[in-house]
Image: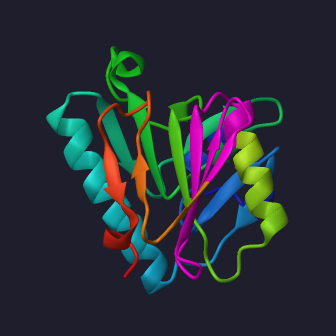
Amino acid sequence: MASIESITTAEDLLHAQDVGRCELVLGELVMMSPAGSRHGAVAMQIGEHMSRFVKHHALGMVFAAETGFIIHRNPDTVRAPDVSFVRAERLADGIPIGFFPGAPDLAVEVVSPDDRPTELAAKVAGWLAAGSTAVWVVDPGRRSVAAHHCDGRVELFGAGDVLAGGGLLPGFSLPLASIFV
């Protein structure tokens, strides 16, 4: 078994045992506490709505939290959004056994009470730099969503709004009141 200090690559992390909840950021392991109940419930609501829509329209695959995506090499970064979507054409060879090579097309980050704004901003920037088309930052405490787009636009939505999938998930709409528990 590898020691936590010796985990510096995506391969080290993939084959490590009993490491706990973490991400690898530029070759350094970042440990994280388990998500809280509200965080998990909100992420599940988003994933459920999105998965049902994506499956019905054969658009690709929705992945649950803890799915690792390799978004940088040398030094390696493996991030795991709370919900993610990958377009069908990127899955032509099937779903990889290990971490997904590259960023998801859509990454959803649900804000936890202990998340720092600078850390969230770094995650958003990292996802977009690695090729994500959009990143949704969902804040259960504020009952809001900030949709960050690869062209630099940021759209803000409140609990009474409907979040649309745009060109990435054409026809998808998510009434935000339905996800905030």
Q: Is residue 5 visible in the rendered structure shown here?
A: yes
User: From what the image shows, is residue 123 above or below residue 179?
Assistant: above
| Image coords of residue 176 (percent x, y) | 40, 65
> What is the tally of numbered marks visible in this picture?
0
The residue that appears at 41% across and 40% down in the rendered structure is 165
| Image coords of residue 25 (percent x, y) | 77, 49
| Left or right relative to 144: residue 83 | left
| Image coords of residue 45 (percent x, y) | 32, 66
Q: Within the image, what quadrant is residue 148 found in?
A: top right
The residue that appears at 75% across and 37% down in the rendered structure is 76
Quadrant location, the N terminus: bottom right
The residue that appears at 72% across and 52% down in the rendered structure is 123
Which residue is more in the foreground, 112 or 101? 112
163 inside magenta stretch: no
Q: Within the image, what quadrant is residue 41 found in?
A: bottom left
Magenta range is 127-155
Q: Is residue 29 visible in the rendered structure shown here?
A: no
| Left or right relative to 21: residue 37 | left
| Image coords of residue 133 (percent x, y) | 58, 31
User: From what the image shows, is residue 33 above or below residue 101?
Assistant: below
Quadrant location, the C terminus: bottom left
Q: Within the image, what quadrant is residue 146 found in?
A: bottom right
| Left or right relative to 157: residue 127 | right
The residue that appears at 42% across and 19% down in the rendered structure is 90
148 inside magenta stretch: yes
Give the image's coloring scheme: rainbow
User: From what the image shows, is residue 122 above or below residue 166?
Assistant: below
Which residue is more in the foreground, 120 or 18? 120
Which residue is more in the foreground, 56 or 79? 56
User: From what the image shows, is residue 176 above or below residue 129?
Assistant: below
